[in-house]
Image (tube, rainbow, N blue to C red):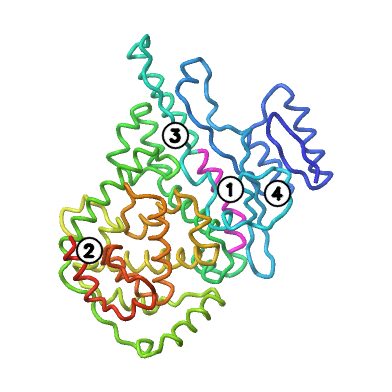
Amino acid sequence: MNSNAICGVRVAASSSSQATLLRRLHQNHSTTPVSFFDIYLQSSRLGRCSQLYQPRRYNSSAIAGGKRSSGVAVSTLVSSTRSSRRNGVITTAFKTNAAPYATSTTLSRADKVNPPASTRAPELVLNERQPDQSQFSFLFQRGRTYLNFYKDGLKAIWTNWNLTRPINASIAESGYKTPADAARAGVLTRSQYQLLHRTSYDLKRLFAFGGILLVFGEFTPFIVPFVPALVPGTCKFDSLVQGERAKLELRRRESFRHIVAPLPKLESESDSKSEVDRDAVVQQDAKTNKTNNDRLLSAVDRLSSAQLLHISNSLNLHSRLYPVSPPTALLRYRVRKYLADYLAVDDLLIRKCGGVSPMNIDEVKRSLAERGVDVLGRKESDLRETLRRWLSLTASKEDVVLELLLARPSVWPSSSHSSSSSTPSTTAQNSTARQ
């Protein structure tokens, strides 16, 4: 494979036509840096996918020193992608933190389970005020740092959208209606599924947040804590994320105190099956890459209004600004959609793509928060073990997720086999007693 370096950007060229294009770009931009999107637009004409970048690490001292940030560190190439279909399976090769010359499409477990780095916000570094620095200069410097951070986050949304285009096209060609259907069929990795999910989340908030940024400018950091639901994920700095989690965990603790009614006992034919038969069904589902959500949806339909409200509070499925409890029909719809169309699919993909071990700590924390588990102030080993227990318990029966959501991890069954011997009623009541 030929490769060329253009103004600090290494781009892989697999054909003579691409090599000619890169030399032409180098001649035309001998004095002017080549932007990332110029390279993307040119290379996409030859059937190449976009290249993934890692946002720069913003430091306000660089601005104070007279160095104006350009928003995106194009020279830092994190990965290259290629999407194709092989035997009905959509493959996108994310060579995360790998050399740009890599030609192998074999993905490691970390590449399969962790989404691209561009789905997360860049690191924000805020320097302290210098002794000889005026208040105006310090505030101006701090505002510029935030503006560059937000600009980079918005550019990451554009990059992620370009990365999802070949995946969405392949899903449409396969005849699947939604990414969740494609994931259940085993044609998506968790990395691809989370890329699609988070990009969709960010695009829905792009225009609202863009309006806030245009109106308030440097004062946007003072506004976003009051409207965190309007901020894309790529524009949420760490303190904002920690603040959201702290409020959600407080809301969850208050909700646990009001759980009184136990989870109703479900009766079905599968309840009479032996453990051997149930394990055989689980293994068959794993081989066919399918999940059966019928039991889960039936269990959600049997939940009381108080239980639905607790699950919605714990998972942050409705706004805290509701003056009264939302309608039960709305809560039931959101809980059904979230559990069946997202959480069950994500559980399946984590098991399929390598489990908890290759997941980075940010993904572990985010996954637990999405499952109604507190993460603040806990050790990494404890967090990983909790996620492993969740995946082990939900692998046996789909509807056991409701028992876990209505109980604290301290009273979860120790294994999937002990889950069947512990009644849901006892689990919910023990959880309430501990609160």
Q: Is label 4 in contact with label 2 (beta carbons under 8 Å)?
A: no
Q: Tell me the tag on residue 422.
A: none
Residue 150: which numbered mark, if any?
A: 3
Secondary element at tag 4: loop
Pick whichever of labels 3 and 2 is earlier in the sequence. 3
Gap between marks 3 and 2 measured at Cα: 34 Å
Amino acid at dot 3: Tyr
- How dense is the environment of label 1, judged by Cα within 10 Å: few (below 14), some, or many (20 and up)? some
Instruction: Identify residue for label 2.
Output: 309
Residue at 40% x, 38% y is 237
Segment tinted magenta in the rendering: 155-171
Q: Which mark is residue 48?
A: 4
Alpha carbon of mark 1 to alpha carbon of mark 2: how far? 38 Å
Q: Earlier in the sequence, mark 3 or mark 1?
A: 3
| 163 in magenta | yes
Hey, what amino acid is under mark 4? Arg
Q: Nearer the viewer, residue 196 or 123?
A: 123
Q: Earlier in the sequence, mark 3 or mark 4?
A: 4
Mark 1 sits on what residue? Answer: 162
